[in-house]
Amino acid sequence: PTPVTAFFSVAPKIAAIGWTTSKEAMSQPLFYVLLAIGVFGLILFPFVPYNTLGEDIKMVKDEGLTLIMILSILMALWTASVSIAEEIEGRTALTLLSKPVGRREFIMGKFLGILVPVAIMFIVLGALFLASVSFKVVYDARETSQGDPTLADCQREMLQIAPGLLLAFMEAVVLTAISVAISTRLPMLANLIICASIYVLGHLVPILANSAVGQIEFVRFVAN
């Protein structure tokens, strides 16, 4: 049996809730709107003049990873708020929990169901991102009148960002889990504010840690 079939046989309730949640999420216009924004941005980035003195490829990598991660996190936040918070407020979840479905099964099913569209966005946009970086190598070589890069040069740049895509997906999974937990108690706006704060503070940690070596006591204290 396939892994999906095996999971349905081992945990049928969790699998059924997750399957329903993922279908509902991917049937919403927001999923396709975010996907279209990601496709447009990844196609546009290689043509933007960054004026970074040879670091244009690095800028494309940073912007592409950030765009994919933010769009995926927005999708996860919205789906968690709609499929959990609104169902709890509308008493729809009580109907489901009145059946032989436990709270842990309900939350785990929702979490796995939300991860499906997030994973699909990473797969689709990630493949386009790799192609975009590969094209940027050729585009920059032609713009600077250098020799045409080899296939190995393009593959090397793509292999360098593969770990970044994996780590970005893991970050999206963590924030999805936090969003699901918050959605059981708070509405969408509070969920968005808390998750955005965690995202910003998490990405500020390296900067604060580097600032801790300075002489400003307050900055050192905050970084610690």
Image (cartoon, helix red, strand yellow):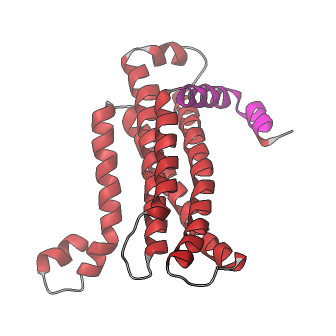
What residue sits 20% from the left and 70% below the top?
222
> Which quadrant would the C terminus be assigned to in this image?
bottom left
The image quadrant that residue 218 belongs to is: bottom left
Q: Residue furthest right?
A: 1
Q: Main secondary structure of the magenta part?
A: helix
Q: What residue is shown at x 51% (from left), y 28% (from top)?
A: 103
Q: Is residue 21 magenta?
A: yes
Query: Is residue 42 one of those drawn in magenta?
Result: no
Query: Image check: 164 left or right of 71?
Result: right
Q: Judge from the rendering whether residue 126 lies leftward or rightward of residue 49; answer left or right.
A: right
Measuring 52% from the left and 42% from the top, which residue is drawn there? 35
Above-or-below relation of 202 to 69:
below
State the count of labels.
Answer: 0
Quarter of the image for the N terminus: give it: top right
Q: Residue at x 44, y 78 (%)?
A: 55
Q: Residue furthest front?
A: 145
Q: Is residue 201 above or below residue 21?
A: below
Quarter holding residue 139: bottom right
Q: Which residues are magenta?
A: 4-27
Q: Is residue 224 left or right of residue 134?
A: left
The image position of residue 194, as x and y in percent, is 30, 45
Q: Is residue 200 above or below residue 221?
A: above
Q: Is residue 140 above or below residue 199?
A: below
Residue 150, horizontal then vertical, whole percent: 69, 79
Q: Position of residue 82 (x, y in %)?
A: 42, 27
* Relative side of 219 to 8, left or right: left
Q: Nearer the viewer, residue 222 or 173?
A: 173
